[in-house]
Image (tube, rainbow, N blue to C red):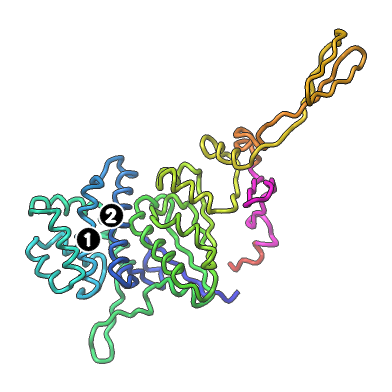
Amino acid sequence: MGYNIIKLEPLNPEQNKFYYNPLLIVEDSTQIREIAQLILTNGNKSVELSTGGSSGGAEWINMSIPLLTATFAYVKEFGKEKTINESIDIILQDDLKTMEEKFKKCSKAYRQFLIFKASSGSERTLSSIKSVLASNVQLFLDDKVEEFTKSPIEVNAIGNPVINMNKVFNPKLLREKPTILFVCVPETKSTYMMPLMSVFYSQVLDVCMTIKEGYPILFMLDEFANIGIIPSIANITATARSRRIGLSLGLQGVEQLSRNYGEENASDILNNLKTKVIFSGLTGESAQYVSDLAGVTTIETKSYSTNQGSTNNAQDVISNVFGGQNVSRSGVRRELITTDEVRRMDENEVLIIAHNKNPVRDNKNTYYTQKRYTSKVKK
């Protein structure tokens, strides 16, 4: 169809046309700090989900952010490769004095280092913070991830090493030409990959939200709850339409959003997503959410009683006598679809609740079971 096709597969880097280096995309100190915070927050979340433990409480995470921010700022300005791994090496290998000497060369880095130094106080505390940092950034020490996030360095015409930016993925591409971007991460590795993928999606969304000109974009984010925490997602879902951006988020249940973003933010995200497509098998909180969202209806009920010669004058009840028996009809309020009916929907059915329209129950249109669609796919 003439689209520019890009496939990014972080755990299979040799198949990628582009590298992805977050530090080559950021443009100011605010964005650098956001990356540091995302990596540490999602690194801690990844450890919690995979081991049941924690790689440091909120206090240690907050103390670590300025140090990681300082190394990112320094490496972006003075680093040879300008990568996250180059930053991690500084944290793991340098003592407090050596770091300070380096960071004095970069005002952005030195400012963050002074914030860190004020809270750390000693080499002993630094050692503990290094331990927390090492646990939360260990994904970037993975050989495949390191390869995927490196800078493609080539020798220019006069023999100097330079970064070939044409081989670095930049989200601006999505606005500049009709592009389909596939991001492929095995579902079994989603928790492990959280620190990287949360940064990736945050950067892509932020860049596309900032650049209003160019082509419209539709994001289809399957297994959304497993790609990491994106702090700005509630605001993005509220304002994306004005930037000609559509969002389609795939969830196993609304509980996943609450777990990652808290009750209030989860509610905001769901309210901002105007169309819900519900599949069968939902239970618990998710089934109740769908039932409440669908609303209520009124159904007619009948009751029968034997006429004993008295007259029933109750309001809104119509009584007819048939052979000595009263037939009473009345309206009863009930859910349009109950939680049990949500769970027991046929597997070929979907329930669609769109904005202020009435709910629609329809059949799936699965492309992979129909020749009229599969015949169009090039093998």
Query: Image point 10% across, 66% down: which residue?
Result: 100
Query: Image point 82% across, 16% down: which residue?
Result: 312
Quick one: label 1 or label 2, which is nearer the N terminus? Answer: 2
Q: Give the amino acid type for the residue marked by disc 2 in the picture.
A: Leu
Indicate left or right for 190 with 37 as reference. Answer: right
Q: Nearer the viewer, residue 176 or 34?
A: 34
Q: Are marks 1 and 2 in contact (CB under 8 Å)?
A: yes
Query: Image point 90% across, 17% down: which residue?
Result: 321
Above or below for 328 versus 6: above
Residue of label 2: 40
Q: Nearer the viewer, residue 4 or 321?
A: 321
Above or below for 310 versus 228: above
> Looking at the rendering, which quadrant does residue 375 occupy?
bottom right
Residue 17 magenta-highlighted: no
Query: Image point 41% across, 63% down: which residue?
Result: 9
| Image position, residue 346 (x, y; %) | 66, 40
> Looking at the rendering, which quadrant does residue 227 occupy?
bottom left
| Image position, residue 298 (x, y; %) | 72, 34
**Range of residues picked out in magenta:** 347-373
| Image position, residue 337 (x, y; %) | 65, 37
Assign a secondary structure to mark 2: helix
Q: Nearer the viewer, residue 36 or 331?
A: 331
Above or below for 334 versus 67: above
Q: Residue furthest top?
A: 308
Mark 1 surroundings within 10 Å by alpha-carbon count, few (fewer than 14), some (14 through 19), many (20 or more)? many
> Looking at the rendering, which quadrant does residue 230 occupy?
bottom left
Q: Give the amino acid type for the residue marked by disc 1 in the picture.
A: Leu
